[in-house]
Amino acid sequence: MRIFSRKTNRHKALISYGRGPEGEEVMINITEPKRINVKTIVAFVIILSVIMWMFSTIYGVDSLNVTSENYFSKGRYVILSSVLCGILLNWLIQAIIYIIINPRSYSKFAVIHNKRNHTIRFFYKGDMRVIHFRIANILAHWICGYIPLLLGFIIEDISVCYFGLLSIMFFFDETSLVWRLRLYSGKALCSYKSDEE
């Protein structure tokens, strides 16, 4: 990428846009903050409050207890499974989609541990189209978080809703990034750049 004419900086990511030899190009420079993301915590508290209010209104106050023997018999199982789903399964689904789009892309996958900020991220080291980035992330996020959240209401099990919500919180910054990339053409080339590179 040679020239980047427009930049947006919102703590979590620096998105640079410009034109290169192959047309429009977008670079996502991950600059993770040292402090806890306040927006994620606020969003979690608000969504959790709304879910609990809706559940208690529709199904009664007793429905808020995690007592389902079919899914999560104890609260700690909800937390453990949401960590695995929100991080590992989320990354796996994204990787599968990238491999379907480009069968040789498996050699470009990387998990980068940022020791300074104690964060771990899944990267695709190479250029991809913005539309492919959107598809991979949106599909993974729906499967890992949003569908379980809705499913919990349908089957009347608050533990599944808790699971979906906690999973969402682990990739909330990715969802935010996808939302911000809505301003760019799906045909634009997209690549990652981390502080450690």
Image (tube, rainbow, N blue to C red):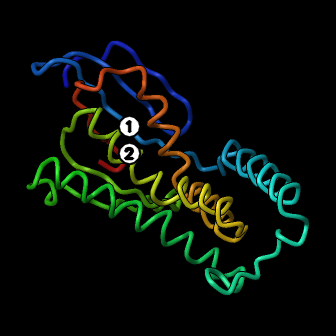
Above or below: residue 159 compared with residue 171: below
| Marks 2 and 1 close (CB-CB < 8 Å) | yes
Q: Which mark is residue 197?
A: none
> In x, y percent, where is residue 64?
83, 69
Circle 1: is it few (<14), some (14-19), or many (20+) Cα within 10 Å?
Answer: some
Q: Nearer the viewer, residue 81 or 152?
A: 152
Name which of mark 2 and mark 1 comes first in the sequence.
Answer: 1
Toward the viewer: 143 or 31? 143
Residue 81 % position (x, y): 55, 75
Q: Please identify the quarter of the rendering in which residue 52 is found.
A: bottom right
Residue depicted at x 83% and y 70%: 63
Amino acid residing under circle 2: Asp
- CA gap between label 2 and label 1 equals 7 Å
Q: Position of residue 113 (x, y in %)?
A: 40, 62
In the rendered structure, find residue 29 and report the number of the disc placed on it: 1
Give the number of marks. 2
Q: Residue at x 57, y 45 (%)?
A: 33
Determine whether, in the image, residue 187 is placed left or right of residue 123.
Answer: left
